Amino acid sequence: MRIIKSGGHRLFEQDQETAAYVSEMLRELEANGMDAVRAYSEKFDDWSPESFELTPAQMDEAIGQLSEQAIADTDYCQANVRAFAQAQLGTMLPLEVQTRPGVFLGHRHIPVNAVGSYIPGGRYPMFGSAQMSIIPARVAGVRHIVACTPPVKGQGYYPATINAISKAGADRIFVIGGVPAMAMMAFGLGDVQPVDVLCGAGNKYVAEAKRQLFGRCGIDLLAGPTEILVIADDSADPMLVACDLLGQAEHDPNSGICLICLSEDFARRALAEVEKQLVVLPTREVASISWGNNGIVMVADSPEEAVSLSDDYAPEHLELHVADVDFYFDRLTNYGSLFIGEETTVAYGDKSIGTNHILPTSRAARYTGGVWVGKFLKTCTYQRMTLEASAEVAAVTERQCILENMLAHAETARVRAERYGN
């Protein structure tokens, strides 16, 4: 392996200053409720409406500001997300098996009751996040979904975001951002009932709030700055590869960008393309920083080494620009979402095609996938037995409990052996 361009692989580590700040905010929000929510909203977003919750009339007004094309395109994207989530749900079957005569063990997939969805704003109004968290939850069978999205500072809602949230199926929509939104949903402030799971991306303060609120409720995952890794052999088009790398670089100055090539010649050509495209990229102010600080270009000595390097990086998004896609598809194990061939691109997954864009970063792809319908389901086991089976199991269980000196446990088995043994 040879390094052509080095850069940092950002790890989303706990920032003690941010952690302390968020902890104090959560303490105040829990103690002072909606008064604290309003105070923080005024401070950070210059936003203090009579009610943070949108009425049906306000939702209609927001949707009415959009073109027919914008509405139709969002409907197209959401239909794709919904179809894929429904197909995923179809794979999650209940189970019951007889493991011994008269012993029946099984599991059921039970949806959580309430989900809080956060749809970020900030540098970009990422209204596509609405369908990524709300639709899988709704398909899973979640009964109640609350959605929060930050205002355009001092102005209020972003119409496309409200349309996306409403069409995705949220029951209530609040225009409130950041840590106050997370606290409102997790603690159950005002007339909001506490949710069971918080879901959605956000800035470092939102991510830290999710970390600290985990336990009070569940969370989807902790996500830091976005990442892309491209594996490209000499059959790839360096223009397309550079285009896709910069597509993620514009997200954030801390975005992670990595290119693994199979020859130095291709690596040099791709590097030249990146620099060429940066000159005319409208968002180069951000993209040039993330590429300069975090862009990595490596040349692997073999396809096997390319797989090893990619799995070690464990990217959020992994693109394959290679001739033999099956070789890599069969061997790669660590990624949030995979894009096979130059015909696909991360933007399709982010916006329109149906796979989810809430994905693991900072090497978390080593142990988790992204948001999907299963994130909102609890797989709960059960057992049932005949009297004869219970008597048989009781004898073994009693002896095991006695060996552990757990005599009250042993008694629960003994009384059943006595009751059912005859």
Image (cartoon, grey):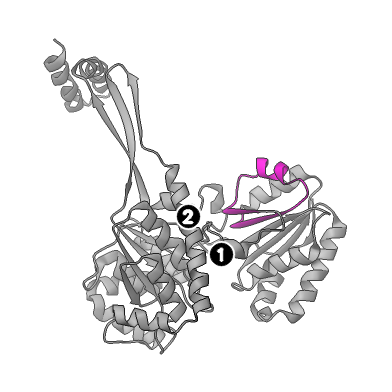
Left or right: 27, with 130 as reference point = left
Residue reaching furthest to the right: 265
**Residue 58: x, y in percent?**
33, 82
Residue on which the image places disc 2: 83
- Viewer-side residue, 40 vs 402: 40
Write the residue at 23% across / 76% down. Answer: 32
334 drawn magenta: yes
Q: How many neighbours does mark 2 have within 10 angstroms: few (below 14), some (14-19), or many (20 or more)?
A: some
Name the amino acid type tagged 2: Ala
**Residue 71: x, y in percent?**
48, 74
- Viewer-side residue, 16 vs 317: 317
Q: Are dots 2 and 1 in contact, CB under 8 Å?
A: no
Residue on which the image places disc 1: 350
Quarter of the figure with the C terminus: top left
Quadrant hosting residue 19:
bottom left
Write the residue at 51% across / 66% down. Answer: 76
